[in-house]
Amino acid sequence: MARRIYLFDTTLRDGAQTQGVDFSASDKIAIARALDDLGLDYVEGGWPGANPTDDDFFANPPSLKTAALTAFGMTRRAGRSAANDPGLTGVLSGGTNTVCLFGKCWDFQVDVALEIPHEENIAMIGDSVAHGVGLGKEIVFDAEHFFDGYKSNSDYAVACITAAHDAGARWITLCDTNGGTLPSEVFAIVTEIAKAIPGDKLGIHAHNDTGNAVAISLAAIEAGAAQIQGTINGVGERCGNTNLISVIPTLAHKYQGAYETGIDADRLTHLTGVSRLLDEILNRAPDSHAAYVGDAAFSHKGGVHVSAVQKDPRTYEHIEPELIGNRRRIVVSDQAGRANVVAQLEAIGLTIDPKDKRITRLVEDVKSKEHQGYTYDGAEASFELMAHRALGDVPNFYDVTSLRVEVERRHNAKGELVSVSQAVIKINVAGTEIMKVAEGNGPVDALDAALRAALLPAYPELDRVRLSDFKVRILTPQRATAAITRVMIESADDQGQRWTTVGISPNIIDAAYEALSDAITHKLYRARVSDRAVA
């Protein structure tokens, strides 16, 4: 019979401690609802009373269907009773039925940070948990610095968690707060602890300072623990926390049914979407190489690999990507063979005889272009246009007669030094000559604005397209200022579609225009031409 493992998400608290992350209350609500829909057991919302954002969140908390919304805080302070500690009272009155309290379990921390007798710290833990239980709360006790404490003074660390257990805590979560414990150590220690405290009351909270947080969490489960705390995409202080996006499918598919969670097969297909949602809220590009959910997690580049995958995906894939909401990608590069190109054509809706001579020419063109500096394994939209053009089915949406981009650095009316970019473009659309002038935040932005302004009357769908990323790489640095430049542009629309295009030239503006033109043409082509079979 499968053993139930409980998933406790701390993204809204631990994730908020990530450098550069600043959740709003509305951000927290959106994330909490997504985690609830995914099927997590606990969603820790933050620390009531700690900051205005958490106060706003708990003042109007989201209504969750599956997950237990959890408030976080610390045990009572020294010298106060549990009932008369304002901090503890604020957490316990935060409106949640579940409360996570942390207390120190390392004698060194008690001596240096708290500067109180060891026995007083144990009493603080027991009193606080007992008070919360007496109020009808489900108490999760986070045993802070437990593993360091156990290695320093095992009797004292065990006495701390025993006090919480005996006071009625539902969960005793063992924390690797410094992130320095190894999986083998965690397995051995949790195995010992499970002899005194039932495994179905033990949890693990790991930080990723050695890159082992997921391995540590799985080691704890194998040793008998039944709860894992972690965050979406592993966000968190310093090097982050246990990545639940990796833990969840691993529990579901790598233990031959030994464990089960509250996430069924249908909900598991939303895993990639939840990962991307957090990145979108944080306004950062998703990690393309993230395990399970990254764009490159199931991508295949070498021709021999692709041939094998087409025969049986299990040759180079450890799991079906669709199970976790991802998809297989066959990328095209100078390492590609005929199989890559055929597979990529099929992926964009073109069915063509593998023996067709045009395939051979397309493979040769790809290798020639990449030798010049183009790259198509990261610019699939440019490859798609290249393939369609080889087949002669890309309409000529517009012709650029001329373009000029200027950058002026001057003092404005306030005497401030500013840089102003301006683009002038002459374009022919369906026989009509159009000239537009636009300013932008840099020359590429100005060029995009001018081109878009010229095309919008004829192609209003471009109003829903935006540039989401812009990368420049110098391909021949030895040529200094005369070096060849490669520009990659990622575009997105309001339907959530993203596509990447590439351009190269000794002139950065020419390279940017080529990538930009491909991005616009790709959008227009996709909007007007349906997928078709090619004889």
Image: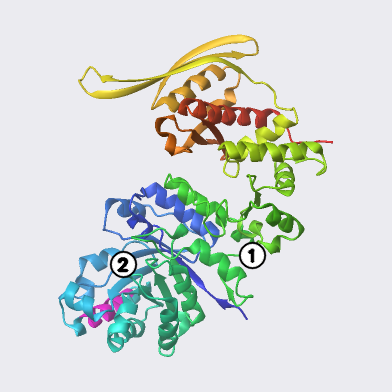
Our reading of the magenta stretch's main secondary structure is helix
Q: Where is mark 2, residue-wise?
A: 92
Residue range in magenta is 121-132
Q: How many marks?
A: 2
Q: Position of residue 165 (x, y in %)?
A: 36, 83
Q: Is residue 404 left or right of residue 114?
A: right
474 is higher (above) or lower (below) than 242: above
Within-10-Å neighbours for mark 1: few <14, some 14–19, many 20+: few
- Amino acid at circle 2: Leu
Quarter holding the C terminus is top right
**Quarter-wise, where is residue 363 in the image?**
top right
The reply to whether residue 66 is in sight is no
Residue 318 numbered tag: 1
Mark 2 lies on a secondary structure that is helix
Q: Is residue 131 magenta?
A: yes
Return the disc, 2 or 1, that comes first in the chain's sequence.
2
Percent position of residue 77, x then y: 20, 72
Q: Which mark is residue 329?
A: none
Residue 385: which quarter of the image? top right
